[in-house]
Amino acid sequence: MTRSFLILLIALGLVSFNAHASENGSGPVGNEAQSSAAPAGTTPDVTARAIFAGGCFWCMEPPFDALPGVISTTSGYIGGRVRHPTYEQVSAGGTGHTEAVEVIYDPATVSYATLLDVFWRNIDPYTRDRQFCDGGSQYRAGIFFLDESQRIAAEASRTALEKSKPFTDPVVTEVTAAGRFWKAEGYHQDYYLKNPVRYRYYRWNCGRDQRLQQIWGDAAPKAH
């Protein structure tokens, strides 16, 4: 079962996600990102921001959340032409956006280079306009840099991967300047925590971990 089909079941009322979202006061409203902060007294004086796209944003939050120094992750949309895009618009492929995650982190604890390493190990860098079972430019992988230092680091990491890649296929993951990041609907945020069984079912059926193991071998991440 692909994620698009799972969302269709939600829309038909066969799976009651909207009821869960309503109970938590987070219905499907496309908003500009306003990342949740850490509890009072725990947020570092200086934080940094990074944006990555790796297919389904449900699956890209967990690997970053697991890193010490990451304060929050937010699922959203980037790289498109429409203001305040909704999931329905983006998933249909007509807005130019791709699903992405915004990572707020403490640079004194975790470096941008480490975030890049986690990003690469959690995507298929050899597939254009597709990640695992999800096809279309709305699922393209990419690094969206926010300043010149991020651009240099991102391009250097891609060059290093091209030299050491396990496959002979070209690396097609884009490195591009970040445009406006739009926060996704509330029911998408922390999906893996709110709906762990459904999340794991989707992830397994999408073949994400199987493909990551094929690409990265011993360096593949553990399933989240």
Image (cartoon, helix red, strand yellow):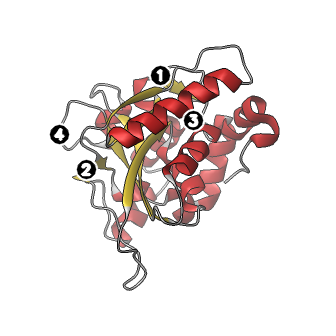
- Earlier sequence position, callout 1 versus callout 2: 2
- Earlier sequence position, callout 1 versus callout 4: 4
Q: Secondary structure at mark 2?
A: loop
Three-letter residue code for mark 2: Gly
Most extreme residue toward the bottom, as rendered?
41
Residue beneath disc 1: 129
- Earlier sequence position, callout 4 versus callout 2: 2
**Residue 195 in which image quadrant:** bottom right
Circle nearer the viewer, 4 or 2: 4
- Earlier sequence position, callout 4 versus callout 3: 3
Three-letter residue code for mark 4: Arg
Residue beneath disc 4: 83
Q: Is residue 80 above or below residue 61?
A: above
**Quadrant of the image containing the N terminus:** top right
Q: Position of residue 70 (x, y in %)?
A: 50, 63
Mark number displayed over residue 30: 2
Q: Position of residue 21 (x, y in %)?
A: 38, 63
Residue beneath disc 3: 2
Most extreme residue toward the left, as rendered?
83
Are discs 1 and 4 less than 8 Å apart at CB? no
Q: Position of residue 31 (x, y in %)?
A: 23, 53
